[in-house]
Image (cartoon, grey):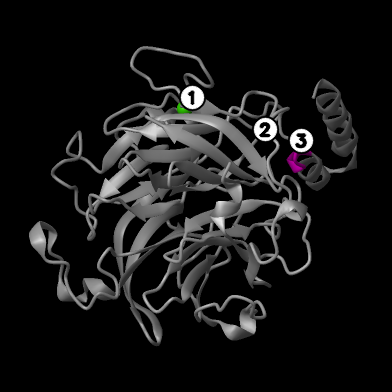
């Protein structure tokens, strides 16, 4: 590992003299996973365990499953596409098989653009849900997108609700806007929790101190109702659910209902310290005051982190049984950890350096795990068919 780091530094210094773009490329190449964490490789999978669902995409950032078995996918440049249901063994879908809509107002640059996607919990049910949390009848058509927009105040991120009709998304309604944005650290994941709240991750937008400002929407995890209001059970009477985040990229609830979030640690000439956090209402996750195992006051350290010599640069996270799976962008792997009582053990890195950068990770209603590659985001090596949506039978990971 030390030799690998030394080599990386030599490559980096070589790249510095070769120009800025080369610096990024050398710096983003994946390291080998730490000793003892290497998981499965593609050659170990039984036939048919991994299938390519779609190819020829450009930075697919998030996917969602439609009631008819089809898929929605966002691409960061600003496109939303709908794919028909995928039959096992069929030819992968290409862009020509998708219905695609350009999302008005998206400004794509750096890490920003069209990012998160979520369906209302009653989407496609033909009802408003009933019970204590009734929604308007049209809620069964509501989808939500998070994207970067450029306006008079500069680059900002927003979450917009639409009605998804056969003709595409219509009636945009901004439910939260003015979230600080930048070429780096735009957060972007949105997800409805089991409590019906809409959770939103926001990055520090390159200004670390804002993560510690309770009045700023930067460096937070937000919780909203389905129209952008403040749920009465939020900790401080605002949309802020937790603070002190640098660039949280994933959200998932485990089978006990606990919320987990992946988060990028420091970058630049220092790397690593990427985090998997257990999110609790009103808690402070420390950025930029503490990282790794450091402690200070009531600030929460991550449950696990990558260490200072290895980088996950995590994408989204998904809960499958007693496992958490999360994607690695720079790490170039699908990570799997075992969850017991809020602790994570036995972390493994599957398919290390075999698929490239992995961003979206979702458990499908069919019990299969869907992931997207992100090799066309300017930081990866573009492989055959990239970017792709893949699905994997998670029982291959049973130990
Ligand atoms: Ca932290």
Q: Nearer the viewer, residue 157 or 150?
A: 157
Answer with the quarter of the image where residue 129 lies: bottom left
Badge nearest the viewer, 2 or 1:
2
Vertical arrangement, residue 334 with respect to residue 60, above or below: above
Q: Is 346 positioned to the left or the right of 285 in the image?
A: right
Q: Is residue 226 above or below residue 333?
A: below
N-term mark: 2 or 1: 2
Q: Secondary structure at mark 3?
A: loop
- Dot 2: element: loop
Whether pointer 2 and pointer 1 mark residues with C-beta atoms closer than 8 Å, the reply is no
* Sequence-first tag of 3 and 1: 3
Residue 148: x and y, percent? 48, 57
CB of mark 3 within 8 Å of CB of mark 2?
A: no
Q: Which residue does the image show at 38% across and 87% down from the upper left?
A: 166
Q: CA distance from mark 3 to mark 1?
A: 27 Å
Q: Was residue 156 drawn as part of the magenta stretch in this picture?
A: no
Q: CA distance from mark 2 to mark 1?
A: 28 Å
Say whether mark 3 is within 8 Å of ligand 1: no
* Residue closest to the far left: 132
Q: x and y percent of residue 351 in the render?
A: 70, 48
Which stretch appears magenta? 27-31
Q: Residue at x 62, y 62 (%)?
A: 59
Counting residues from the start of the chain, the first of labels 3 and 2 encountered is 3
Residue under pointer 2 = 37
Say above or below: 353 vs 133. Answer: above
- The residue that mark 1 highlights is 288
Label 2 Cα neighbours within 10 Å, binned few <14 / some 14-19 / many ≥20: some
Q: Residue at x 63, y 37 (%)?
A: 348
Instruction: Count neighbours of disc 1 (C-alpha within 10 A) and say few if under 14, some if 14 to 19, many if 20 or more.
Output: some
Can you say which quadrant of the picture contains the C terminus? Answer: top right
> Which residue in the structure is indicated by mark 3?
32
Q: Nearer the viewer, mark 3 or mark 1?
A: 3
């Amino acid at each position: 590992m030390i030799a690998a780091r030394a080599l990386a530094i030599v490559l980096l210094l070589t790249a510095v003299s070769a120009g800025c773009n080369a610096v990024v490329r050398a710096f983003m190449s994946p390291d080998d996973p730490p000793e003892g964490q290497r998981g499965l490789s593609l050659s170990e999978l039984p036939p048919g365990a991994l299938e390519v669902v779609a190819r020829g995409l450009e930075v697919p950032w998030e996917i969602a499953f439609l009631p008819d078995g089809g898929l929605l996918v966002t691409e960061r440049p600003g496109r939303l596409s709908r794919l028909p249901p995928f039959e096992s063994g069929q030819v992968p879908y290409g862009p020509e098989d998708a219905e695609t809509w350009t999302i008005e107002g998206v400004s794509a640059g750096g890490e920003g653009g069209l990012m998160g996607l979520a369906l209302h919990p009653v989407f496609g049910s033909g009802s408003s849900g009933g019970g204590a949390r009734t929604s308007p009848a049209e809620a069964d058509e509501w989808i939500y997108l998070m994207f970067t927009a450029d306006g008079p105040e500069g680059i900002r991120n927003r979450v917009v609700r639409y009605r998804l009709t056969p003709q595409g998304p219509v009636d945009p309604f901004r439910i939260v806007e003015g979230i600080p944005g930048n070429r780096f650290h735009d957060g972007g994941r949105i997800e409805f929790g089991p409590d019906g709240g809409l959770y939103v991750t926001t990055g520090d937008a390159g200004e670390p101190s804002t993560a510690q400002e309770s009045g700023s929407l930067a460096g937070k995890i937000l919780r909203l109702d389905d129209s952008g209001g403040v749920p009465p059970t939020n900790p401080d009477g605002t949309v802020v659910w937790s603070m002190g985040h640098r660039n949280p990229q994933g959200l998932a609830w485990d089978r006990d209902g606990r919320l987990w979030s992946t988060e990028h640690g420091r970058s630049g000439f220092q790397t690593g310290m990427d985090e998997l956090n257990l999110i609790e209402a009103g808690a402070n996750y420390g950025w930029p005051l503490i990282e790794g195992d450091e402690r200070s006051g009531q600030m929460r350290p991550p449950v696990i982190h990558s260490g200072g010599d290895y980088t996950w640069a995590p994408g989204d996270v998904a809960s499958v049984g007693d496992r958490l799976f999360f994607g690695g962008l720079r790490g170039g792997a699908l990570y799997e950890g075992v969850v017991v009582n809020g602790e994570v053990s036995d972390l493994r890195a599957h398919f290390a350096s075999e698929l490239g950068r992995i961003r979206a990770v979702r458990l499908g209603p069919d019990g299969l795990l869907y992931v997207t590659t992100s090799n066309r985001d300017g930081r990866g090596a573009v492989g055959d068919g990239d970017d792709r949506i893949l699905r994997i039978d998670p029982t291959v990971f049973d130990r």
